[in-house]
Image (spheres, grey):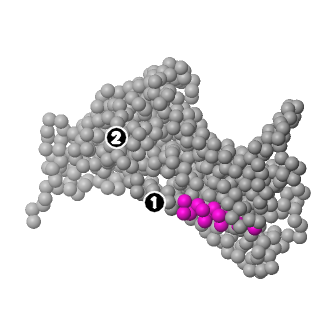
Amino acid sequence: MSRRTAGQATTRAGGGARVEVVGLTAGYGRTRVLDAVRLTVEPGGWLAVIGPNGSGKSTLLRSILGFHPHQGQVRIDGIPTIGMPRRERARFMAYAPQTPVLPDGVTTRDYVGLGRTPHRPLLAAPRAVDRQVVADVMERLGLGPMAERQLATLSGGEQQRAVLARSLAQQPRVLLLDEPTGALDLGHAQQVLDLVDLLRRQDGLTVVSTLHDLTLAGQYADRLALLSDGRVVAEGVPADVLTAEALSRHYGARAEVVHGPSGPAVLPVRSPD
Amino acid sequence: MTTTTPGSRSGTASAAAPRRGRRPGLALGGAALALVLAMFAGVWVGALPLPPGAVVATLLDRLLSPLGVAVPGGLDGTQTAVLLQLRLPRVLLASLVGAGLAISGAAYQGVFRNPLADPYLLGAAAGAGLGATLVIAYSPVQSVGPVGIVPLAAFAGALVGVGCALALGTVAGGSHSPTLLLAGIAVAAFLAAAQTLVQQQNTEDLRKIYGWMIGQLGSSQWSDVVLVLPYLGVACAVLLCCGRALDVLAVGDDEASSLGVHPGRLRLLVILAASLATATAVSVSGLIGFVGLVVPHIVRRLIGGSHARVLPMSLLVGGAFLVLADLVARVVLAPAELPIGVVTAFVGAPFFAGLLWAGARRR
């Protein structure tokens, strides 16, 4: 916390934190979904968690956030999150879920302002510093013109930016994104990921995201972790993780991996009849 | 926690501050004015019309007499008695009941993220109905000390109803809101069935039971006002404090957790406070429908969906709405009175329909 310039009215305060996941095991009822997952993300790094449907990607994210009961440890800059008060945790980690709930009748500005919740007493009105941070974030994400519009009237891409803005208003040191591009077309998906990458570079934020699209994962993240049946079966730079052999074994997919200048791209190939 | 952010209070007192907050303040001020005007109208109008100027003079005289100030031009003896013993307690009670029901409705709708939720949803109405019916049918006494037995039984019944729903919901699925909602519906159905059974066994009390069930403010006294004020005051204060937290809860349980809020605890607190307000309102007025369901929606159409604004606004608008509804109930068939529950639905439903229609056209 000492690195954070307290009260500074900017979203660029802080910088990323190191995230360590050690022996994380979790499940639903008796079904084990995650099995002794071990991961490390360096400060300012972007780890994309990939894996076939049902491999435990979302559960991993929710366990790191402490929403899902689990064994093992999650450490942020060496501090275990177990026993950490929820508000304090919320000042370390921000979360954007796969399908965010966008409340009715709420303006974009008010929605982004929710991100300030962990920084002020729950009963208190927004302070000047809160309003300033919200205004800064919205400016950076190009949401200024939509400030007074209802969330529901924004386009899908704008809504995703609003969710991102809310997470950034939280001034977190780690950003956890569950399928940030799930509902977006290719162009908007790239815009959002470019934005995340820009914010990460400017603020030194640590990003942990799940990404369904392997090509996008390979192009944007600096490290990938491949989950299969709740285990990390491969972890490393994208070129090492995304191999035709791994895709075949863990996804049951036929695909070629093309290596481009900004990372590997996955090209699905139809089987010869 | 605030110790880690020493510079945050001072420092950037920024230019972003003044532009916001004016409009919500204006709306709140308008609603407060509406409530005051409605209360004055409620005092002036009736079988014995009271001259407005003299009413104000009398009230000022009463308020200022401890200071040794006499205000001339007040009402005569009979008029003063009507004002102080009949109109004033009735209008105050109507505003308290309306305010309590409306803010509870808004809180329930927020906590369940369900626009159809109303204060009676979790078994409060069915419990109160059963309690009232039981004592009307079987109780040998009419009051315990100064407090009537029917309000007492209704209050207890409402709390028991909500308590059962909460217990059942918690056993069945934690504080997860759909489960709780279904538990409430189950409990309400059971209690309503029990109430019907008791009622059928005691047909000679039917009129009295129905009279209570449909809601009434005709027998309002100062003792009722004094009785409900502390409970309603505490419950409404808690709910008003929870507005911002409810705004956070509106984005979903996971996201609320990631913002440092405990959804389960918050939901329980809000439900308890809203149920206390509902039980208190129901105990003195019976089951007045429509206010808790519709007033929050009217308010949202006026000032948007933020609970931090909807809750206080519902409080004021609900109070004004019920005072006016009671006024209509008194004058339409004067000297006879309509049940106020009939008026709230009769006046409220077309008004709300018109509002929906206007909203649809604007889009």
Q: Are marks 1 and 2 on the same chain?
A: no
- Residue A86 visible in the current orientation: no
User: Residue beneath label 2, please?
Assistant: A161
Residue B185, given in percent of the width and then of the height, sits at 60, 66
Nearer to us in this view, B136 or B268: B136
Residue A26, given in percent of the width and then of the height, sits at 45, 50
Label 1 secondary element? helix
Identify which residue is drawn at 53% across, 59% down.
Answer: B352
Q: Is residue A218 magenta?
A: no
Q: Nearer the viewer, mark 1 or mark 2?
A: 1
Residue A168, given in percent of the width and then of the height, sits at 40, 34
Label 2 secondary element? helix
Q: Which residues are magenta?
A: B336-351
Q: Is residue B341 magenta?
A: yes
* Looking at the image, residue B208 lies above or below residue A112: below
Identify which residue is drawn at 54% across, 50% down.
Answer: B299
Residue type, numbered disc 2:
Arg
Say the numbered circle drawn on residue B357. Answer: 1
Identify which residue is drawn at 68% across, 54% down.
Answer: B323
Identify the main secondary structure in magenta.
helix
Q: Quadrant of the N terminus of chain B?
A: top right
Nearer to us in this view, B105 or B304: B304
Q: Quadrant of the C terminus of chain B?
A: bottom left
Nearer to us in this view, B14 or A176: B14
The chain identifier of the residue carrying mark 2 reads A
Name the image quarter holding residue B221. Answer: bottom right
Q: Is residue B134 left or right of residue B144?
A: left
Residue B119, given in percent of the width and then of the height, sits at 63, 58
